[in-house]
């Protein structure tokens, strides 16, 4: 196959890079939404429920107007501060972060900030409908470069 006039391998690389960047951005948004939903569902990234609050904790929460649930949510600052940072140049890289001071110190041994398991297997992501769709889009755009 021969490139159309004015087209080159650089155009192919631009198409691939642009589409994969969009793919990773979508995945990162999905990860962030799922991590935040763990607070509402009171479970970790692997679907295990959190340990119920101690009676003394429930009493404290009620005394200060926070209610009995959800676990780990008083003001919502921690949940709302969750961000997922990914490097699209390194497939599969993503890190869940929070800028709330106490997030790491208080919750470092709780897996609510882990990346959900379904996002950890890159091959499965690629085999998913979303992965197949992006690969098909890339293939179609690249074919347009050739005569």
Image (cartoon, rainbow, N blue to C red):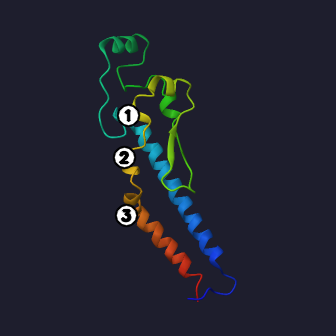
Secondary structure at badge 3 equals: helix
Q: Decide which of tag 1 and tag 2 comes sooner along the chain.
A: 1
**What residue does disc 3 label?**
127
- Figure quadrant of residue 11: bottom right
Mark 3 and mark 2 residues within 8 Å of each other at the beta carbon: no
- Please, is residue 29 above or below residue 48 in the view? below
**What residue does disc 1 label?**
40
Question: Residue 117 — which label?
Answer: 2
Task: Tell me which residue sits at (36%, 46%) in the image.
Answer: 117
Q: Name the residue furthest front.
A: 90
Q: Badge 3, how many Cα within 10 Å: few under 14, some, many 20+?
A: few
Counting from the top left corner in percent of width and height, residue 43 is at 34, 34
Counting from the top left corner in percent of width and height, residue 68 is at 35, 20
The C terminus lies in which quarter of the figure? bottom right
Q: Which mark's residue is nearer the viewer, 1 or 3? A: 3
Secondary structure at badge 2 equals: helix
């Amino acid at each position: 196959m021969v490139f159309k006039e004015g087209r080159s391998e650089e155009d192919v690389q631009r198409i691939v890079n642009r589409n994969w960047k969009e793919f990773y951005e979508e995945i990162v948004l999905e990860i962030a939404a799922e991590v935040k939903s763990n607070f509402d569902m009171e479970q970790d990234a692997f679907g295990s429920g959190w340990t119920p609050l101690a009676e003394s904790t429930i009493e404290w929460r009620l005394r200060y107007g926070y209610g009995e649930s959800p676990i780990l949510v008083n003001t919502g600052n921690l949940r709302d501060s969750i961000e997922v940072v990914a490097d699209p140049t390194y497939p599969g890289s993503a890190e869940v972060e929070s800028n709330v001071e106490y997030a790491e110190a208080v919750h470092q041994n709780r897996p609510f900030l882990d990346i959900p398991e379904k996002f950890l297997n890159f091959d499965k992501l690629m085999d998913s409908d979303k992965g197949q769709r992006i690969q098909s889009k890339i293939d179609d755009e690249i074919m347009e470069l050739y005569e």
